[in-house]
Amino acid sequence: MFSTADTIVAIATPPGRGGIGVIRISGPGAATIASALSGRAWFKPRHATLVRIGGAEARDEAIVTSFAAPASYTGEDVIEISVHGSPVLLNAIVQAAMRAGARLAEPGEFTLRAYLHGRMDLIQAEAVQDLVSSVTPLQARTAFDQLEGTLTDRIREIDSALFDLSARLEASLDFPGEGYHFVEPERVTTELDTVIGTIESLLRDAGAGRLVREGAQVVIVGRPNAGKSTLFNALAGAGRAIVTDIPGTTRDLLTEQVDIDGIAITLVDTAGIRQQASGVVEAEGMSRARSAAQRAHLTLLVVDRSRPLNDDDHALLEATDRSARVVVLSKADLPGAFTDQVLSAEGLDVSVTAGIGMDELRRRMVERLGLDGRHRETPAITNVRHADLLERARFALCRARESAQNGMPEELAAADVVEARAHIEEITGRRTADDTLHAIFDRFCIGK
Ligand SMILES: Nc1nc2c(ncn2[C@@H]2O[C@H](COP(=O)(O)OP(=O)(O)OP(=O)(O)O)[C@@H](O)[C@H]2O)c(=O)[nH]1
Ligand SMILES: [Mg+2]
């Protein structure tokens, strides 16, 4: 179903104009196609060669780099052609490569081939995609760690411990009559405990890892004129939202990506929520604000401390009571107008105009997202797929330990260890269903 018999081509650089544009060709016909495009018979591997390239419509000077199988990104013969970054030129060269026998690559097909040829495992292939789509330096660093194989190594350790254990369990099943045990039940439980411990330590940071990889949605809500858009602009570091002293200024949702302590936060500014909307537009804005708050990982509830609390504030305080929230007591540069002790204790005094409380606000946001700062040391598990499979492996191993402890027949423990190994091997892709591969590689961009 995944053929690697043909030769694929794609533009590897992003769409649009640039200083340089790169075309990548991979497969058995790569060298022949490069010769057809350039008129040059042979390219010395791993050397940059200057040639003229292209056909009648468009031509350019190009730097061609050739990589001979298996020492290339995909493990196949690969040709990389760098030309001036013009979309017209790049497309013309791709067309010429196709006339010479190449096929347009599917999204992620270069990396898929790297995986199929054993140049990287599935963890590393997924890390390539994470690295390309990272929006904070921490995301990039974490993805690169996985690309380098740090997680792969730890998963391999688990796999080989389980391989060892299941081999001995099965050997002892083969000689049942002789009363010969290759493994004592106590040894089995201790060894299982060690592996379960390793898995649990990996899973411990999986929640933080997921936030690092996927980012979080943080929604700013509050009554009209509370200072939401002012706060949004301050956190975004840009005058994105309109700020006026007219209540009901913001109507639609505004979003901005910000990096807060390495986490890619999608910050959402919303329309002020009050009981009486002054028209259909405001009413629609309010309903959008409410549903955005429901989807959010965290709510920043802005309460204007320079005005007495009103019913709108109370309604919002109640509505967000059970969710992860930070209460922002805004306009702290002005005299306070309410004396609610509980609220003053929970809330954080912030004044954007006077620059009060912003660092503390960022700190609390990270804390309320459930992070304790250790996420900066690049968590090992960031991908839900990996966490889910580790959890299943852990479950099977706990079952194995229980039957070993209770002196149940060895084949029960053996079967559970085999099942756990299957989950572990699905993480690295030693054993992976085609539809999982489709789900992973379809998210890639073309040329990757
Ligand atoms: N003194 C002072 N004024 C502030 C502060 N933050 C916001 N304001 C003022 O409060 C008014 C309302 O600010 P906005 O940010 O537009 O409030 P909003 O909550 O987005 O309002 P709506 O979009 O209408 O719901 C503006 O006149 C701001 O200049 C602050 O920290 N101190
Ligand atoms: Mg606003």
Image (cartoon, rainbow, N blue to C red):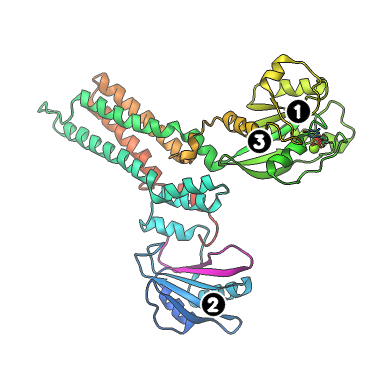
Quadrant showing the N terminus: bottom left
Q: Is residue 344 magenta?
A: no
Q: Is residue 69 above or below residue 360?
A: below
Magenta residues, start to end: 2-26
Please indicate whether residue 56 sits to the left or right of residue 37 in the image.
right
Measured from the top left, where is residue 422 in percent x and y? 35, 40
- Identify the amino acid type marked 2: Ala
Q: CB of mark 2 within 8 Å of CB of mark 1?
A: no
Circle on res. 96? 2
At mark 2, the secondary structure is helix
At mark 3, the secondary structure is strand
Residue plotted at (41% across, 63% down): 4
Q: Earlier in the sequence, mark 2 or mark 1?
A: 2
Determine which residue is flagged by label 1.
332
Q: Earlier in the sequence, mark 3 or mark 1?
A: 3
Please indicate whether residue 40 sits to the left or right of residue 412 in the image.
right
Residue plotted at (77% across, 38% down): 229
Q: Nearer the viewer, mark 3 or mark 1?
A: 1
Residue 311 occupies quadrant: top right
* Measured Cα–Cα span from mark 2 to mark 3: 48 Å
* Measured Cα–Cα span from mark 2 to mark 1: 65 Å
Measured from the top left, where is residue 29 in percent x and y? 42, 73
- Identify the amino acid type marked 1: Ala
Determine which residue is flagged by label 3.
218
> Could one spot residue 418 in this view of the protein?
yes
